[in-house]
């Protein structure tokens, strides 16, 4: 399913501790350019020390999309660790720089996430803001199924946003 043919110089890789500055950079970019899509806000995240971002990298599996050695996309997968819920993981932090959308980057990232998850968990869960049809269509294309809507999941200055709950059962 990979769509690298439309962009030859794209590289998808798992972010390591050495990539913490890239992780911080793309995370802050996502909050600045798509604030309505995330539960945290730019000014709060920007104040956090690099160590906070390093902690997130250590606690989860993050995949970055690079074009010409610059990070332009992100997906973060966090596996639950309880005895009864370690079979599932949560996809979050999904973002591709607006000027590079519709070039297969999100597809390439999701390919890697699913490939990794298939070896470690049985299912991937996610939430997506209701009305974000591009994201919902992408997830459905990969087999994610909506199983509910959380009303008023986020409160913004413009009002409340609902979130669509989706799951992909891998095995």
Image (spheres, rainbow, N blue to C red):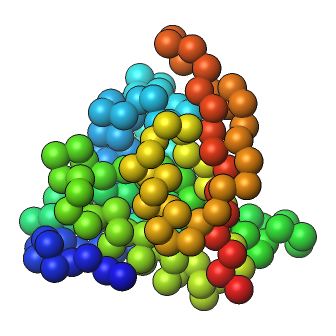
Q: Residue furthest right?
A: 84
- Whether residue 7 is visible to the viewer of this picture, yes or no, is yes
Question: For residue 159, what is the image quadrant?
Answer: top right
Q: Residue at x 18, y 53 (%)?
A: 100
Question: For residue 20, what is the image quadrant?
Answer: bottom left
Q: Nearer the viewer, residue 1 or 85?
A: 1
Q: How many marks?
A: 0
Question: What x and y, as percent, mark residue 146?
Answer: 66, 56
Question: For residue 55, what is the image quadrant?
Answer: bottom right
Q: Residue at x 30, y 33 (%)?
A: 33
Q: Residue at x 63, y 45 (%)?
A: 164
Q: Nearer the viewer, residue 101 or 43?
A: 101
Question: What x and y, as percent, mark residue 151?
Answer: 72, 30
Looking at the image, residue 46 sits to the left or right of residue 6; the answer is right
Residue 129 to residue 57: above or below:
above
State the quadrant of the N terminus.
Answer: bottom left
- Whether residue 21 is visible to the viewer of this picture, yes or no, is no
Question: What x and y, as percent, mark residue 74?
Answer: 37, 57
Q: Residue at x 25, y 47 (%)?
A: 97
Question: What x and y, as percent, mark residue 162?
Answer: 63, 32
State the quadrant of the C terminus.
Answer: bottom right
Looking at the image, residue 13 sits to the left or right of residue 135; the answer is left
Residue 23 to residue 124: above or below:
above
């Amino acid at each position: 399913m990979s769509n690298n043919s439309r962009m030859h110089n794209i590289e998808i890789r798992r972010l390591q501790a050495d990539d913490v500055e890239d992780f911080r950079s793309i995370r802050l970019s996502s909050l600045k350019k798509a604030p309505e899509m995330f539960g945290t806000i730019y000014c709060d995240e920007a104040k956090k020390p690099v160590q906070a971002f390093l902690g997130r990298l250590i606690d989860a599996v993050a995949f970055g999309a690079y074009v010409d050695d610059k990070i332009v996309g992100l997906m973060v997968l966090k596996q639950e660790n309880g005895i009864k819920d370690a079979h599932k993981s949560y996809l979050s932090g999904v973002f591709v720089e607006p000027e590079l959308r519709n070039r297969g980057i999100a597809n390439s990232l999701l390919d890697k996430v699913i490939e990794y998850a298939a070896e470690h968990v049985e299912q991937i869960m996610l939430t997506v803001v209701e009305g974000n049809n591009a994201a919902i269509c992408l997830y459905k294309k990969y087999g994610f199924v909506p199983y509910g809507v959380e009303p008023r999941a986020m409160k913004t200055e413009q009002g409340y946003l609902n979130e669509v709950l989706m799951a992909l059962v891998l095995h």
